[in-house]
Image: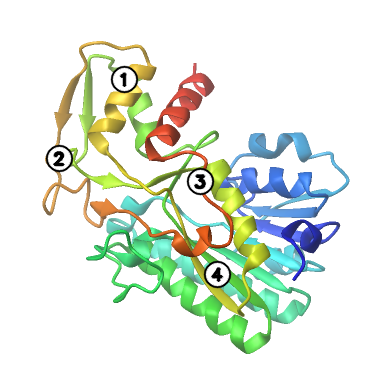
Amino acid sequence: METADKQLVHRAVLVTGGAGFIGSHLVDSLMSRDCKVHVLDNLTGGSLENVKKWLDHPRFGFIHGDLLSKADIEAAVEGCEYVFHLAANPEVRLGSVAPNVHFEQNTVATFNLLEAVRKAGTVKSLVFTSSSTVYGDALEIPTPEDYTPLEPISIYGASKLASEAIIMAYAHTYGFKATIFRLANIIGPRSKHGVIYDFVFKLKKNPRELEILGDGTQAKSYLHVDDCIEGMLCGLEKSRKTVEVFNLGSEDWVDVKTIANIVVEEMGLKNVAFFFTGGVDGGRGWKGDVKYMLLAIDKIKALGWKPALNSTQAVRATAKTIIEENR
């Protein structure tokens, strides 16, 4: 099988959500591999600032459009051989208030994209960024890809699992390859949501006290975005089956209180009082929050990938970046 570099060189590639956090880092990597990159993004979560260095490049095209518009999708997919589907609403907490948003922007949007892929007939391979939330409160930790039952506890997780199932069915039925990545918490430059970002901005407003959702013992795996992109391209390169599912995360986890301490240290603050809300359902930050998450990554490691940074290193590097980006 061709390497990822050879597979993608000079090929037309679509990245949905390509102006977003993870998507823009993927665009950078694909452009460095001499791909012809199309980005479809409605800019509700992403920003042109993230891809501004490519806007005038002859191999780059930006479509300000929406996956809920079939015309926008069909225009974006036209002529593409590879599709990286990253567009989604990433806010897990939103599902308890407005579940229709996740259903429309994650599940319906995925179906619309797959219909455009089916009609175009040119797509060889589709890559999808799913989520560790499809496992729900897994009883096996670290959690492997073949863990069952898949029982999401958030609308976000359910929308990702539904998208996985539709993608699998389309790949088998219509003859293209699908590679699905269940991501841990991805962090790094350009991130505009998540616990590190929230802590930095809370402390900018009040450097004496920090409100922490939950009881502070929630522990999860964090993966730096650079490691994430390398893992995705490795999985695309070396997967063999029509449908492959890979976990992408670090091999350790870090709890919320430790993250708070790291952010405080990196901001140069002293004597910050932590206020824990106590949370819901046994100390979770919010309804639907998975309290403990650590993915087994043996499958992707067997293909030659491993993260350069562990969770704590990735958190510290991201805290430094977010603080610097928002001075």
Badge 2: residue crowd in 10 Å (few <14, some 14–19, many ≥20): some
Please give the residue where the numbered disc 2 appears in the rendered image. Answer: 215
Q: CA distance from mark 3 to mark 4?
A: 28 Å
Q: CA distance from mark 1 to mark 3?
A: 25 Å
Labels 3 and 2 touching (C-beta < 8 A): no
The kind of residue on which mark 2 rests is Asp
The kind of residue on which mark 3 rests is Pro
The kind of residue on which mark 1 rests is Val
Counting from the top left corner in percent of width and height, residue 76 is at 74, 62
- Say whether residue 234 is left or right of residue 291: right
In what quadrant of the picture does the N terminus appear?
A: bottom right
Q: CA distance from mark 2 to mark 4?
A: 35 Å
Q: Which mark is residue 110?
A: 4
> In terms of secondary structure, where does tag 3 sit?
loop
Q: CA distance from mark 3 to mark 2?
A: 29 Å
Residue 194: image quadrant is top left
Please give the residue where the numbered disc 3 appears in the rendered image. Answer: 307
Position above or below: 254 against 143: above
Labels 2 and 4 touching (C-beta < 8 A): no
The kind of residue on which mark 4 rests is Thr
Q: Which mark is residue 264?
A: 1
Residue 21 visible here: no
Q: CA distance from mark 1 to mark 4?
A: 39 Å
Mark closer to the observer (3, 2): 3
